[in-house]
Amino acid sequence: MPAIGKTQRTILLLLAAGGALLLSRSPRRSFRIISEVQRELRKLRADALRESIRRLYESHLIDSRDLPGGETRITLNNDGKRYVLKYRLDDMRIVRPKSWDQKWRLILFDVPEKRRPVRDALRRHFRQLGCIELQKSAFIHPFDCQNEIDFLIEFFQARRFVRFLVVEQIDNALHLRAKFHI
């Protein structure tokens, strides 16, 4: 993925939120966008916006199409969507319920050495989600996290290497309960 700046990241996230950004060539209406993201665009300087859009286009993260009336439609392409997902990946959290269901979520994985970057990324994200490493390729969490784990597995294209189990008993439960404060 290309390195991008704050303005470019903002544009990508706005495109992800709004679907498409309409830019007008007319000086009177420099741009319009769906109402809920218009405030964010107004914070950007017009010249910085144009330059950032050009760089995103050259980085193959967005596509553009000229429309009648002098407008240009800018949309995220597949690489841009993947970048936005990666950016949001870092903000993912597991919700802690009011009461624990007394079940453990065990994540087992066996990613081959030739896909080591995927294995390392999975480990890093499992830790970031608050999972505890039982062994090099086994993590545990007390709360429902199947959606988050499934998202990671799909994002890193590691479905065949990862297993997700829900277990009711584990021999070191007291130690784990203390670590998770439950």
Image (cartoon, rainbow, N blue to C red):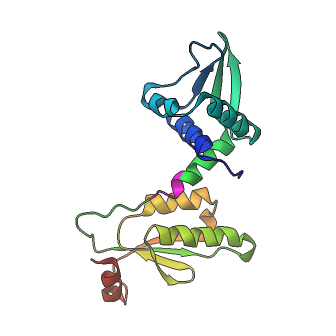
User: Would you say residue 49 sits in the magenta stretch?
Assistant: no
Residue at the image position 58 percent from the left and 37 percent from the top: 11
- Using the image, determine if residue 148 lies above or below residue 167: above
Residue drawn at x 35%, y 83% is: 176
Looking at this rendering, what residue extends furthest in the top direction?
69
- Closer to us: 148 or 128: 128
Which of the 4 image quadrants contains residue 65? Answer: top right
Part of the protein shown in magenta: 88-92
Q: Which one is nearer the viewer's eye here, 46 or 70?
A: 46
Quick one: 178 or 30, which is closer to the camera?
A: 30
Q: Is residue 133 placed above or below 20 in the rendered structure?
A: below
Q: Principal SS element in the magenta part?
A: loop
Residue 180 falls left or right of residue 30: left
On screen, residue 95 versus residue 126, left or right, reads: left
Q: Is residue 99 above or below residue 136?
A: above
Name the image quarter holding the C terminus: bottom left
How far across and down, in percent of the image, does residue 22 sit? 59, 22
Q: Is residue 145 left or right of residue 112?
A: left
Residue 181 in percent (x, y) is at 29, 78
Relative placement, left or right, of 101 versus 164 is left
Residue 28 occupies which quadrant of the picture?
top right
* Residue beneath the point at 63% across and 64% down: 158
x, y percentage for residue 30?
Answer: 59, 19
